[in-house]
């Protein structure tokens, strides 16, 4: 059988998830993706974050390379315009033809614009794509007033965006209340009250008749009730409509009000064609959320991979979100439409909180809930709802605050099938499997299952389940760093700081036992260095260091070392380049440019290190700390000084940062970069702390890394001036140095902080722990006591003794043998050594 | 060199050449010997071959010394396996050994006896 051709039309969130799922199932298929938008799939759900500073590129869910690596052919910017079912082919706008054995339609939906005269004005916009966002931003620039038509979930999100852009914002809704789909009347009223208090004007029951140009403002909206509203721009967010035109034209079954009809296998009326996501109509309904779309994608992927007969059974549409800073939750039958249902309502007009639960007539089963102003009960209620857990005798106790002991639905009470994370479909059972499979922390479980990495709404529930499970297993997670100290690295740091302990021996005497080992010795040496910043080769610290720290160079596989002088920001003069070349030539070293914009010199024998460094130091070089768990480089692009696109001096900032933090010893190596504009040539978002220039200053990204498990850094703060930027980085680094585990990189550290990025913001920006002054002081001390370890070493005969290869001979290590390759040396392989040694006899 | 008998002690260096709680390397009868100085133990000095049998490079004198489960050990700086200072046995890989050498302090002198 020849490889089946799978054609995917539409590369939105769901289309992408389908491809990812199918590739993950590892089948022999030939996948082609055709997308209308000019870029690969991105995270539409978090689109609004671009208004608060996130770069559109950060939203990417895939890149062209992702698809290339998966062996998937992808074409962007050229939509399919026709399906020829008889030939099993499609035709694109550009006239290209693609054939298929099976086709998946994932064309999503488009924003509905009511047929109002004047709605085609160029100041009337919609909100669905990255391009739309650009138009909104551009139009907002010369606007003072903005109107959102539509008071639903997306409309209110959009209103928030306009407000953040500094516009006086109005919401115009046709229906009598806001969020009529998710909220009952009481909830809707409370929401309105809260939103109006934030300065957003709400106009309900308004039927727009026409939009005309006006003098005072750019536009005027005329309503059926003869009132009018002046505005400079309008964004329509009045619902979505499935993009089913292709299906219509090729005579696939579509619903009366749109949507491609699919069955529980997501098959359309043509059994070779599937439809998934927001273009699909299942059971008479469009699922306008991403999680149900993902389920559909998985269902089709597993069918095409010939796996178990997965089916789509509909999906729960409960939602919890923050709209304009207001917590809103809606579960199940929020309107109490089920026959015979009864409801319990709690309303607190002073605190502006509204809660209602709808139960079966006997009060035993939860049918729905509405929460406005306080979503704390959402997770618990949702679990009652999804799992049909019997309610307590007095159901109202679930929503009435402080009415005695609130019966908490503990994680232990949840059935195995309970969905904890609906974005990634992670059940309690999956979490338990992950724990059985060796995960032993919240961070591990997140990494393994992806739970809580989508919308993040389940974070508290996830933590609860993980902790309950761990303690049920009697796992007291032993975080002792080794057998000599019953403490975590963080605890040791604290003990050393409070007790002003300055040597390993004192630490061992006061808090440990035995003699120490290769785990605790370097860890404590690093803590001592972070705290007191003495030279690592001072006598009490000497035996504690890994060989790299002992010899201030990086040991390679044959026991020789590599030498990496600091080249701050990657900026180097021709004279210094010449010195590096001369030194490398004199000692016959192999030279290579590193990923961190420096030059690595390999093949130095231990006794040569001081001689090499004497020459380098004389020429003005400093140690690069490539051997330490410390700051490596701050990479930079060339920045506004030379680049046509740069908006700030990225090289200057990189040099400033590198010189500030060089020599800071930390739990793991630290990397950084500064980009001069959003093109991001320095790849700052893959660093522990990355800085990207904006027209108004700098955006700071934290906790990214490359390496084995790459992670994009998170946008932490935007448009900072130099001073604030440095202050935040000072605090961030010191807080990390103080609290991280041994060899824990910043990304894992943050994942394990309860509250993650938000918590970090609270600590670093809002000073919620009241420690910022201390952190800054500590950093100032480290910066103030910096010394180039090599400069000090070459001037101290005692320290130099250590570098002799043999204490009793000037011979060289005969085990080190080099051969030539591409005009440079490399270590000889075992069989080459045997040959070389034999022939020299 | 020929004259040195295999069971003869050789003075390789003085105590001041050693590094407290760490290792140095000496060339004894053509062989590389790592010498560790742990002044607060009974024997005070220990000697193993300098070659790491797993990493296949002469680096053992540059490992960190300490104890694990009561045994004195040195960790290979290449791949971090631990070897007992008393026996040369590898703790992680059964059957892997580093040769041991006799070593002693005589006043300020460090004596090593090259293995046969
Ligand atoms: C601002 C905003 C906020 C949201 N917030 C949430 C939220 O908090 N929670 C939630 O669950 N959901 C949210 N959603 C909804 C969520 O984004 C959608 O459910 C999800 O994107 C649907 O995925 P999809 O792939 O079906 O459609 P889309 O992501 O729209 O992708 C469809 C893709 O197909 C392309 N296409 C269409 N026709 C063709 C053609 N003929 N040829 C080629 N390509 C074509 C389109 O250009 C598009 O790129 C939000 C949506 C928006 C706009």
Image (tube, coloured by chain):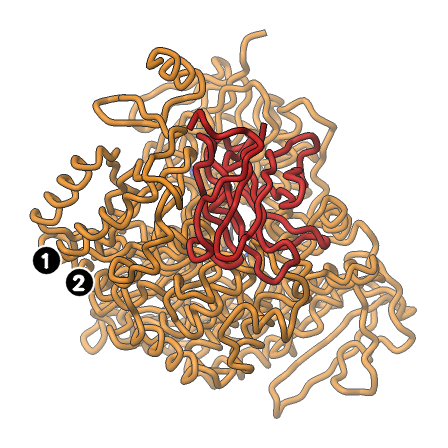
Please state which of the two labelled residues, at mark 2 or mark 1, is closer to the viewer.
2
Tell me, yes or no, if residue A117 can be seen here. Answer: no
Residue at left 28%, top 70%? A719
The relative height of residue B34 versus residue A504 in the rendered view (above or below) is above
Q: Position of residue A373 (x, y in %)?
A: 60, 79
Binning the other alpha carbons within 10 Å of mark 2 as few (below 14), some (14 to 19) or many (20 upward) gives: some
Res A641 label: 1
The vertical placement of A43 against A604, above or below, is: below
Determine the image quadrant of residue A539.
bottom left
- The chain drawn orange is chain what? A
State the red chain. Answer: B
Chain label for disc 2: A
**Element at badge 2?**
helix
Q: Residue at x 31, y 49 (%)?
A: A683
Foreground residue among A273 and A701 = A701
Q: Are discs 2 and 1 both within one chain?
A: yes
Q: Is mark 2 within 8 Å of ligand 1?
A: no
Q: Which residue is mark 2?
A: A652
Residue A469 quadrant: bottom right
SS category of the residue bearing label 1: loop
Q: Residues within 10 Å of mark 1 (few under 14, many from 20)?
A: some
Residue at screen point 69% across, 30% down: B95
Residue extending farthest top: A1
């Amino acid at each position: 059988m020849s490889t089946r051709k799978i054609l995917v039309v539409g590369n939105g969130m769901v289309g992408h998830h389908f491809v990812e799922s199918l590739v993950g199932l590892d089948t022999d298929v030939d996948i082609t993706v055709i997308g209308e938008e000019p870029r690969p799939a991105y995270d539409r759900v978090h689109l609004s974050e671009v208004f608060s500073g996130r770069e559109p590129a950060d939203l990417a869910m895939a890149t062209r390379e992702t698809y290339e690596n998966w062996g998937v052919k992808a074409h962007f910017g050229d939509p399919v315009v026709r399906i020829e079912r008889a030939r099993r082919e499609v035709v694109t706008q550009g006239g290209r033809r693609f054939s298929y054995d099976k086709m998946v339609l994932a064309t999503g939906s488009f924003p509905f614009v009511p047929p109002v005269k004047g709605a085609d004005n160029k100041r009337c916009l919609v909100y669905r794509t990255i391009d739309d966002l650009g138009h909104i931003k551009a139009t907002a620039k010369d606007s003072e007033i903005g109107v959102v038509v539509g008071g639903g979930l997306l409309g209110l999100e959009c209103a928030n965006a306009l407000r953040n852009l500094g516009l006086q914002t109005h919401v115009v809704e046709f229906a009598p209340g806001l969020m009529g789909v998710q909220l009952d009347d009481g909830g809707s009223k409370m929401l309105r009250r809260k939103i109006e208090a934030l300065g957003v004007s709400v106009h309900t029951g308004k039927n727009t008749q026409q939009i005309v140009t006006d003098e005072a403002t750019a536009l005027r909206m005329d309503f059926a009730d003869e009132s009018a509203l002046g505005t400079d721009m309008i964004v329509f967010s009045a619902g979505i409509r499935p993009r089913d035109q292709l299906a219509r034209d090729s005579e696939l079954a579509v619903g009366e009000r749109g949507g491609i009809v699919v069955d529980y296998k997501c098959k359309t009326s043509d059994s070779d064609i599937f439809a998934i996501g927001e273009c699909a109509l299942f059971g008479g309904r469009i699922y306008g959320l991403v999680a149900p779309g993902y389920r559909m994608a998985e269902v089709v992927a597993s069918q095409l991979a010939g796996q178990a007969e997965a089916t789509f059974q509909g999906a729960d549409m409960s939602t919890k979100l923050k709209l304009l800073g207001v917590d809103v939750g809606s579960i199940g039958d929020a309107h109490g439409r089920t026959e015979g249902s009864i409801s319990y309502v709690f309303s607190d007009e002073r605190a502006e909180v509204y809660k209602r639960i709808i139960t079966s007539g006997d009060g035993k089963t939860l049918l729905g809930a509405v929460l406005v102003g306080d979503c704390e009960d959402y997770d618990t209620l949702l679990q009652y709802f999804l799992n049909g857990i019997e309610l307590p005798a007095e159901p109202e106790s679930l929503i009435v605050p402080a009415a005695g002991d609130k019966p908490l639905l503990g994680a232990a009470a949840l059935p195995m099938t309970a969905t904890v994370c609906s974005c990634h479909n992670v059940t309690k059972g999956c979490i338990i499997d992950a724990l059985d499979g060796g995960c032993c922390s919240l961070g591990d479980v997140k990494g393994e299952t992806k739970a809580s990495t989508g919308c993040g709404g389940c974070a508290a529930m996830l933590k609860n389940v993980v902790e309950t499970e761990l303690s049920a297993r009697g796992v007291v997670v032993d975080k002792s760093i080794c057998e000599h100290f019953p403490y975590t690295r963080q605890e040791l740091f604290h003990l050393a700081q409070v007790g002003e302990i300055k040597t390993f021996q004192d630490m061992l005497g006061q808090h440990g036992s035995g003699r120490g080992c290769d785990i605790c010795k370097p860890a404590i040496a690093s803590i001592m260095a972070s705290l007191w910043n003495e030279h690592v080769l001072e006598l009490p610290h000497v035996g504690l260091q890994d060989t790299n720290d002992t010899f201030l160079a990086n040991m390679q596989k044959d026991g020789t070392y590599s030498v990496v002088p600091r080249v701050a920001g990657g900026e180097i003069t021709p004279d210094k380049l010449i010195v590096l070349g001369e030194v490398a030539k004199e000692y016959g070293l192999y030279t290579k440019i590193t990923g961190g914009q420096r030059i690595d010199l390999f093949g130095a024998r231990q006794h040569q290190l001081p001689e090499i460094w004497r020459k380098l130091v004389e020429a003005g070089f400093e140690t690069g700390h490539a051997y330490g768990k410390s700051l490596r480089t701050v990479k930079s692009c060339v920045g506004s000084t030379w680049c046509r696109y740069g908006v700030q001096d990225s090289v200057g900032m990189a040099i400033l940062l590198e010189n500030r933090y060089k020599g800071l010893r930390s739990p793991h190596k630290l990397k950084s970069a500064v980009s001069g504009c959003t093109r991001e040539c320095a790849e700052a978002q893959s660093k522990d702390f990355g800085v990207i220039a904006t027209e108004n200053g700098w955006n700071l990204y934290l906790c990214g890394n490359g390496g084995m498990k790459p992670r994009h850094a998170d946008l932490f703060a935007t448009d900072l001036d130099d001073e604030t930027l440095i202050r935040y980085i000072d605090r961030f680094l010191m807080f990390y140095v103080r609290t991280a585990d041994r060899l824990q990189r910043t990304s894992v550290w943050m994942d394990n902080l309860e509250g993650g990025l938000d918590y970090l913001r609270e600590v670093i920006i809002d000073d919620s722990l009241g420690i910022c002054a201390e952190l800054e002081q500590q950093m100032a001390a480290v910066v103030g006591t910096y010394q180039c370890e090599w400069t000090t070493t070459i001037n101290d005969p005692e320290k130099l003794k250590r570098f002799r290869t043999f204490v009793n001979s000037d011979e060289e290590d005969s085990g080190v043998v080099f051969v030539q390759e591409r005009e440079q040396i490399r270590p000889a392989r075992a069989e080459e050594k045997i040959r070389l040694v034999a022939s020299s006899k | 060199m020929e004259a040195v008998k295999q069971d003869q002690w050789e003075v390789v260096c003085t105590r001041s050449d050693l590094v407290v709680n760490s290792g140095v390397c000496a060339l004894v009868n053509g062989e590389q010997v790592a010498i560790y100085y742990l002044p607060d133990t009974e024997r005070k000095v220990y000697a193993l071959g300098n070659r790491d049998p797993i990493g296949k490079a002469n680096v053992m004198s540059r490992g960190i010394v300490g104890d694990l489960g009561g045994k004195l050990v040195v960790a290979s700086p290449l791949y971090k396996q631990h070897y007992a200072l008393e026996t040369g046995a590898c703790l992680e890989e059964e059957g892997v050994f580093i040769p041991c050498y006799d070593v002693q302090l005589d006043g300020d002198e460090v004596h090593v006896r090259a293995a046969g």
